[in-house]
Image: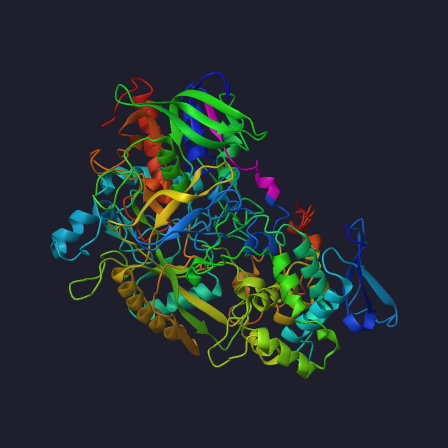
Amino acid sequence: MKTLPKTDAVVIGGGWTGLLIAKELAARTPISVVVLERGAPRHKEDYAGGMDELDYNVRFRLMQDYSLQTVTLRYTTRDRAVPIRQLGSFMPGQGTGGAGEHWGALFPRFLPDVFQLLTSTTQKYGAKKLPEDHSVVDWGITWDEIEPYYVRADKLVGSSGKAGNIRGKVIDGGNIFEGPRSEEYPTPPTKMPYYGSLFNDAAKSLGYHPYPNPAAALSTAYTNPDGISRPACFYCGFCDRFGCMVGAKAQPTNTLLPIVEKQKSVSLRHGCSVRRIEYDKANGGRARGVSYIDASGEEIFQPADLVILASWTLNNTRLLLLSGIGEPYDPATGKGVVGRNLTHQVSFTPAQAFFDKPLNRFMGAAPAGARMSDFDGDVFDHSTLPFVRGGTFAAMGTGFQPIVGFGALPPSVKARWGAEWKKAAVYWYDRVGTVAFAGEHIAYKDHYMDLDPSYKDHLGDPLLRMTLDWRDNERQMVAFATAKAVEMARAMGAKEVVPAQPYGHYDTRRYQSTHVQGGTIMGASPEHSVVNTYGQHWQAPNLFVLGASMFANNGSANPTPTVLAFTYRTADALVDRYLKRPSRLT
Amino acid sequence: MRRRQFLVLSAASVGGVLVYSLDRTVSRVSAQDKSAPEQNIRIPLRFFTASEALIVAAATARIFPSDESGPGAREASVVVFIDRQLAGPWGRDRHRYTHAPFDETAPEEFGYQGSATPQQIYRQGLKQLAGFDQLTASEQDAKLKLIEGGLFFNVLRRNTIEGMFCDPQHGGNVDMVGWQLIGFPGPRMTNFAEVDQYRGEPFRPKPVSLAQVAVHPNKPGEDET
């Protein structure tokens, strides 16, 4: 193994969190930073010729190469896990920008009570309301502490939207159920494509409170506080799962990389697969640096004073387990912490709606549409309902492209091929829409991650094993959401509405969302969490973990704004406190 | 290496096909070009044998037929698309996790757990369809009904839809016949005005392909290693 000269900081992962922390450290301190990215280099210019559905939306050009590394899954601790062999229910990224390149750029915040889910739920409904085997905890942080960092995240991407609550003043037309914002969105809402307006009008007619999707695809040209200028969206429809050809959709390559690449103190290395964080347990624990295989296949040790783990939820957890840092969680005893509180998201299509007119859904941007939060979180009373929490309904603006979109048919058409099928599928192609739902997924005691005993990656290291399934709370939430979505689709004027099937088992084939959380959760004490609320590891004060692996539970909202907010908070703590006097921050 | 095989068809029988030479330069016989209807076209094949290609052309034409409701798999040159996909990284399972053991008893929610690559699925599946291209249309439909519940048919059906509606740079959707059929306008650089203008009314401009709108279209995935 070759040992390189020591760097002040090494960052594992070149996505949203890794490049944001690198940018902040480089701009605000003199320290040297090495960023290690396992994938290939990418620049915003690469996307100008990439509006190709087959390569990006069907063959998943921007996503993680599962031939090298995937995860295994089992439903219960009694089962043998099976590898997820092809991309499906979630889409991790690979290459500069990570999943932040191909994301859908929805930019909503979590509800304030998500951060104190245990306390808020038990205070209102008593200790018996949560399922018996839940693992719900508080995060050790409050809305007021994190809100200023949400503002920083909004300004970074120039989020487009309409506030529903500014410092306690409720504003019609925004999300009136959201936590109080200190400021309006940096840019106004995106255009509302026709299909979104159908949703908006229907929600109003039913007495709900729709609002434009908060978007990180710009409604108007915007220059952020770092001086990065991006143009307005052109509504080309090649958005989610693509890189933006003009840079209207915020991506690490168009928002952070241009700054990071100019900094002499930052070295960005591609093709580097980190295998271990080298760790000394003595004296309260310390990370010595990281070992990795570089692009040429050589084993490298990169010593560092500060190690920042920013490699997405599943890989963050896996690297801590592989490195032997912290006690692995054991669902049988409840002891240990690394890998606990794995949650995904109750994200599905509760209703398909068939219209008698063309919708032109190929025009738009992933976040250009409408949503409503009348059944989100604990906005509605659950006293007589057989589940806790909820989610948002939305009409998304994702470009409705022909390979993926072709073949949605009302149940009256039985054929799956041949002349009758072709004729019907051609007719319905542009007359079908969906009401989407994204709901919270609470944590359970035996939903967790550990190392798989048999399957390995291309380097011979064990894969991560997920133990996860849907439970009664999710299935009841889905049944409730399905009934509401059918009501919405009818109010939108659909001629035929097809409700979703009841939720069965977790299905790796069906895209859910890429909102996988937990494994290295934050908390107020080391007994129940892996890191403090700054992401600082309890057993290694010079190791910080960033991203949704810190989240003790899923909030129904898309997690990137919250991920960026916590990363800014960690950046401030590093710059203002830790680097001046390296020690425990809490 | 096997001797290179060609799919030999008359231009009239296929409508339009994308013809590419061994060095991958592309020329095209247009679906609308009726000037030389008796001309034979020799399409160099990357994966299929000539007889396999004829079977796939016939089967995809039953899945997505050419009829009074519009063009189908023959006009879109779906067989050429599938041939190229199978020869490329997708056909070889270049990006799928293929470590053993393969537990094919896992519930279907765990996704495809077999060891066979798309290339192998086709080779095996096509054996069931020997002589298929010589049958009448109704005999062909009867034959496909026998296999429609199986893995090979599902992959073939999915690939047929892909070949109908992919960007023409992949060898299918020749002349954008698939996009014209359903009213998809292709990768237009902007819909900034149209997204406001067309509300419940069809917006059906003449489609454009990536080669027409992009200065440097990305290299097609099937040409990657």
- Which image quadrant for residue A304? top left
Tell me what residue is drawn at x 16 percent, y 66 percent: A384
How many numbered tags mark residues here? 0
Q: Please report the bounds of the magenta region as a residue range.
A: A33-46
Q: Residue furthest front?
A: B101
- Which image quadrant for residue A425? bottom right
Residue A68, placed above or below residue A479: above
Across and down, in percent, residue A253 comes to 52, 38
Across and down, in percent, residue A312 comes to 41, 40
Figure colour scheme? rainbow
Tell me what residue is drawn at x 78 percent, y 53 percent: B2
Residue A498, placed above or below residue A310: below
Which corner quadrant holds the C terminus of chain A?
top left
Is residue A39 in the magenta section?
Answer: yes
Residue B88, placed above or below residue A403: above
Across and down, in percent, residue A507 comes to 40, 59
Is residue B186 in the magenta section?
Answer: no
Please say whether residue B45 is visible from this viewpoint: yes
Tell me what residue is drawn at x 54 percent, y 50 percent: B96
- Report the side of A124 relative to A30 (left or right): left
Please say whether residue A160 is visible from this viewpoint: no
Front in this rendered view, residue A126 or A218: A126
Q: Residue furthest top?
A: A5
